[in-house]
Every structure is written in C-alpha cells, then in structure tokens.
Amino acid sequence: MEGAEFLAGVLTDFVGRGKYLRSMFGYLGWRAAAPDCPAALDAVTGLELLHAFALLQDDVMDGSLLRRGRPTVHVQLAAWHRGQGMSGCPDRFGESGAVLLGDLCLVWAEQAMRESGLPRDALDRGWPRYDAMRSELAVGQFADLLNEARRVPTLDEVMDVLRRKSGNYTVRRPLELGAAMAGGGDDLVALLGDYGTMVGEAFQMRDDVLGVFGTDATGKPTGDDLAERKATSVVVLARELAGPATRPRLDALLHGSDTDDGPVDVAAARELIDATGARRRVEELISTRVAGALRLVEAAVDDGHLGDDVAGVLRAMAVRCADRIS
C-alpha cells in the first residue's frame, strides 16, 4: 500500500517517544501478585498502543500542533500529502489519517494482549477490567468536550474528567488489570486501585501545572493549555480563588468575549493565575495525594500484601509521576 512505510515510521517514532507509564504500571500490578513473566510483559505492552490511540485522536480534536517535541501525527500526514502532490485538502487528509491510525492502534492493543501467550484464564480475568478502562477513557474524553463547551465548568466537573480520562487510565486501571490477570486477591487489587487513584490524580494535576507554567521540555508549546483555552484544574481553581476584581480580568483573558476570540495573552494569564494562589494550591493537592499513596505502600508492606521489591518501585513511580517536568 502506498504510504505504508511512511506510516510505519511515523507510528514507530511516536510510540517510541512515550514514557511507557501504563505498561510499567500494568506489569507492576502483575508483579505485585506473581513472579516475572515474559508473556505478561508482552500483554501489557498493548497499553502503549491504547495510549497511542487516545493521543492520536485527542490531538485531532484539540487541533494540537506539537506532541512529544515534534509535529503531531495529523500535521505530519498533512505535510506528507503536500509533499506527494496529492489532490484534496492536506489538513483534512492528515486528520482523517490520524484518526484511522488511532483506530488501528486500538485494534492492535487488544491483539497484543490476546496473542501475548498468557493462559486463557489469566486473560479472562483481565478482559472485564480492560473493557471498563476503554469505556471510561471514551466517556472521559466526551466529558472533556462538554467541559470545553461550558463557559465555566466547576472544579468537581474538571476533577471528574481528570480521573476518567487520564488518572485512572494511566495508573489505577493498569495496576488493577495486571494484578487481576496474575490472580491477585480482591484486597490486593483494591489496594493497588487506591494507590492508583491518588498517583493518577497527582500525575494529571502535574500535567495541568505544566500546561500553564511548563517550559519547552514538555514537548508542547509553553502555556499550551492557556492558548487552547482548556478548563484544567489549575485554570478553574484560579477562577474560584480569584477575588471579585480579578475574576472578570481572568475570564476576559481565558475566554475572550463574543466580539473578541483572538489569541490568549499567555504571559498575562499565567501571571494572573499565579497571583490567585492556584498554582500553590494545586501543588498542595499533588503533595497530599503522593503522601497518601506512599502511606498505602508502607502499610501494605507491613501487613504482607506487598514485597519490598515491588513496593520500592511503587514508591519511586509515585514520586516520578508527581515531580516530572515533561
């Protein structure tokens, strides 16, 4: 097929530049309940393809130009269309191609699990959790669209999306999936789920902080969330904390008006958000969640639910998710 080699290269490069958090947490879930197993490692690699599916389509929906420090896939496909001298709209081609490539990743993600070599009973324990994770991801994405359509969503609404779209699917669900496939008991799966909820929320709130105050190290334009007028935890909390004199200025910067839908003054918005104390408050929320997750790990070691090796990695991953700069 024409373009197959190009597409393979684009996808290989895209997946290869990821953090591999979901597959790492999936395998940690397995190791919390069972010994090392190459087939289990093969199974959880499918989570990286599931993540690729989500990112490819999310970038199209957001109209993002950069991802992981390079042009997004739909932008690359549009450029390839132009370079080949093809007919039709290059941008439309790029967006459609990225959606289809995402669909292919969704298919391959399940195939990776099914063909991993894990026994059928292990996979049967995992499928309900995998299906729930996929459904939760899609519902969270739609809820995110709703929040963007609302002029001013509440912090509770934003946090609900944060859990569904990113927090749960990044940490909690992969841990539960791995532990369930390994035959872990209900207590262990619940413990990992509670840890995953706290670390997942910390991970996404860190992402929200980086979306406002991050540098080029994030692989996205600085102030990307502000430029795209995203209703993140930092932005919504800033509005809730802002005084009556500051809130209208913040709304004008972030939402424009019926007559002014021009680009956001990112520097001014960033300064105003910082002045409300929202950044400091989100940092406190992140620290609280990481501390809670670490307490859970310590208690699990003390009561024999977790071995020292897995516990050590869980501690390190909690800190890594919360303290990252990209």
Image (cartoon, rainbow, N blue to C red):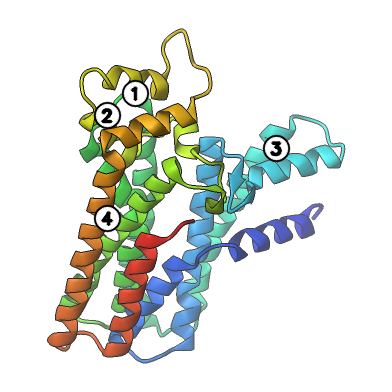
Q: CA distance from mark 2 to mark 1?
A: 7 Å
Q: Which one is earlier in the sequence, the residue at label 1 or at label 4?
A: 1
Q: Which one is earlier in the sequence, the residue at label 2 or at label 1?
A: 2
Q: CA distance from mark 1 to mark 4?
A: 24 Å
Q: Residue at x 27, y 22 (%)?
A: 247
| Residue that label 3 marks | 93
Give the vertical position of 316 relative to 194 (above or below).
Answer: below
Q: Amino acid at mark 4?
A: Ile
Q: Which mark is residue 250?
A: 1
Q: Are marks 3 and 4 in contact (CB under 8 Å)?
A: no
Q: Which mark is residue 326?
A: none
Q: CA distance from mark 1 to mark 3?
A: 37 Å
Q: CA distance from mark 3 to mark 4?
A: 40 Å
What is the residue that sits farthest to the right in this orientation? 85
Q: Residue at x 32, y 68 (%)?
A: 318
Q: Position of residue 308 (x, y in %)?
A: 27, 89
